[in-house]
Image (cartoon, rainbow, N blue to C red):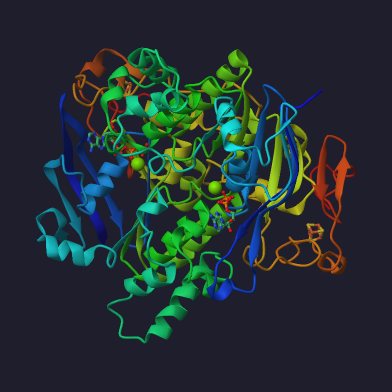
Amino acid sequence: MSALLDIKDVVVRFAVRGGVFSSAGSIDAVSGVSLSIEEGKTYGIVGESGSGKTTLARAVAGLHHASEGSILYRGQELRDLPEAQFRKLRREIVMMFQDPIGSLSPRLSVKSLITEPFRIQGMKGRDLDAEARRLLAMVGLPPEFATRYPYQISGGQARRVGVARALALDPKLLIADEPTAGLDVSIQGEMLNLLARLQDELGLAIMIITHNLNVVRHITDRVGIMYLGKLVEEGETDTVFSAPRHPYTLALLAANPEPDPDAQLMRIELQGEPPSILNRPKGCEFHTRCPFAQARCSTEVPLWQIAGRAAHRCHFPASWEQDKACPA
Amino acid sequence: MTVLDIQGLSVSYGTPRGELRALRDVSLSVPERKIVGIVGESGCGKSTLISAIIRLMAPNARVRSGTVRFNGQDLLALPEARMRGLRGTEISMVFQDPMQTHNPVLTVGRQMIDIQYRDKRSKADKLKRAAEMLALVGIPDARARLNQYPFEFSGGMRQRIAIAMALMARPSLLIADEPTTALDATLEVQIIKRLRELQDEIGCSILFISHHLGVIAELCDEVVVMYAGEVVEAGSVRDVFHHPAHPYTRALLECDPGHIKEKTRNLPTIPGNIPDLVSLPGGCIFADRCPQRHDACTEHPVMSEASAGHRAACHLIKAGAPA
Ligand SMILES: Nc1ncnc2c1ncn2[C@@H]1O[C@H](COP(=O)(O)OP(=O)(O)OP(=O)(O)O)[C@@H](O)[C@H]1O
Ligand SMILES: Nc1ncnc2c1ncn2[C@@H]1O[C@H](COP(=O)(O)OP(=O)(O)O)[C@@H](O)[C@H]1O
Ligand code: SF4
Ligand code: SF4
Ligand SMILES: [Mg+2]
Ligand SMILES: [Mg+2]
């Protein structure tokens, strides 16, 4: 099956200026990521804050330059694509940003905001009032919201305006950075059901970045776990959730707070603090915090290993063969 | 001792359509050294409540009635200069959107030194404290990163910096509006643990707003459930999560995907919409969407006790129906 989006060994490098970083020169915020997204499917990206999720998403959307690797969209190389050509693709690949209020221009009304994509794409002759009503209805906001300004709506309402805007042009690939952070569970459910419906109706592929593991578990087909700019584990969501192999994935799944004050929590405590990408640990980059690290981990880089319906990067992955309840 | 005591607070926004009654008769209190969580649907007035407490309200907002007492003094009656003195020192805040907290044109180190303006220490000492605080919330290379500007950090890092900045002042009340939504689960639980430790060490109280029921369950001692501008239920987290007394709270808990063990693409929601706060319906505010609505519900229910220290505004409680 050919993928809609095929990312191979993508590196996104930022130059760092003077001061204490003068010796570093540059940092790789995304450091060799490969994944592919099938048409009409949902791919979830989770990982530590600062692990490069947004940067990766922005590279796919053409908002950051990928220094290395390849980003194929329907077989077409997006890396180094001239802006004039990329512009046409912006109808098909749209990004919803993480910071809902900050990414909405405060001087534009909701109507202008959600119909702005038509103007940017130079699509004239549309009834913008009707489009605004259609888009607002799609995200469950009453039509009178069209005349409001960003400061007059709540954080959750702003998020829905962001979705309406993203869907204006009937995209093929929607990149959603934390689309439900700040939404209460009922509206989060509505939003995710809405995305699922649109996905079924429009064959929309979705790349979703989220910290909410419950969201990932329910709505994604595949999931990639990022740490320090690299994937440490990726595969079919069901497989990764039922039999996680990489210790960071284990810690992440164990950390999911339960809506029960008396829940018996089996936490896997990570040691220390997230390392800096200016100073990547040798060997396995997770070894400074890994509760299962052994001598070999600090010297030898673990290889990407494909195991069944998932793949991981660890010398001593959890094993689920002998005892399903207790990772080794 | 009660650190924060809010009684009968009503706040409205002036809009072209008329008065939008964002908060109505809200009462809640935050005891000393306790963590009180607020949950509720988006637009239910949580941020409005906070902006009223710290008196940083939108220009079209107006307090119609009520009192907000902080360590005994009525904040709503305080001269602006005194209020400014309290903000960021005795009451500090972490916002939903960390960019709101940071000044984009100053380095993080500069901002963290500025917060310590009342301290007599040397600049080097203040920098050292700033770096310690950053390390405490899990920012790597804390010392070096003090020279960077807010935009050079990821969203989650900015949020952790905001938490570090808020706690530097050793406030007696920390107000946190969705502070962990940008963090991954391991950091979220780490921050929750740190918040608890720091709260214990500093001896402050926390008013914590979150949509994440799991986080509230884990962090808070008490929880206040808000719906469409009113408090509908309040009590210990154990009582409210195990024996929700208000139909809205029950619906909220049922919608949490964390409660749903089977994988589904069709998540439960609460059908219907929040009522229009400009033209409020009479009777119970949740009646439109309530599966247990009955004749009595055309009357507005008052908060009544479901069990000791556990209250909810629903007619079913007085009728003695099982909670
Ligand atoms: N300046 C304003 N003018 C008019 N209406 C406003 C203004 N600010 C907020 N509102 C309205 O008041 C209500 C409460 O908003 P508020 O931001 O307090 O909600 P919230 O609970 O914090 O939501 P979220 O969790 O999504 O941030 C909403 O209906 C919102 O649209
Ligand atoms: N424009 C930039 N210049 C320099 N560093 C950046 C820039 N944008 C992001 N970074 C750095 O790249 C890393 C990854 O950031 P980001 O992609 O925002 O992470 P995430 O979205 O996972 O929280 C962080 O260390 C961040 O400080
Ligand atoms: S390779 Fe070693 S340090 Fe790295 S994740 Fe696996 S066990 Fe932990
Ligand atoms: S008072 Fe009536 S409508 Fe309101 S929550 Fe209780 S049962 Fe439902
Ligand atoms: Mg991000
Ligand atoms: Mg809010």
| Between B281 and B127, the one nearer to me in the picture | B127
Does the rendering let one see residue B59? yes
Q: Is residue A70 above or below residue A285?
A: above
Left or right position of A299 against B30:
right
Label count reads: 0
| Between B25 and A15, the one nearer to me in the picture | A15
Left or right position of B284 against B134:
left
Does the rendering let one see residue B291? no
Q: Is residue B272 above or below residue B137?
A: above
The residue under the point 43% across, 51% down is B179
State the image coordinates of residue B180 (x, y, percent, origin top left): 48, 50
Q: Quadrant of residue A217?
A: top right
State the image coordinates of residue A224 (x, y, percent, origin top left): 71, 41
State the image coordinates of residue A36 (x, y, percent, origin top left): 74, 34
Quadrant, the N terminus of chain B = bottom left
The residue under the point 26% across, 25% down is A147
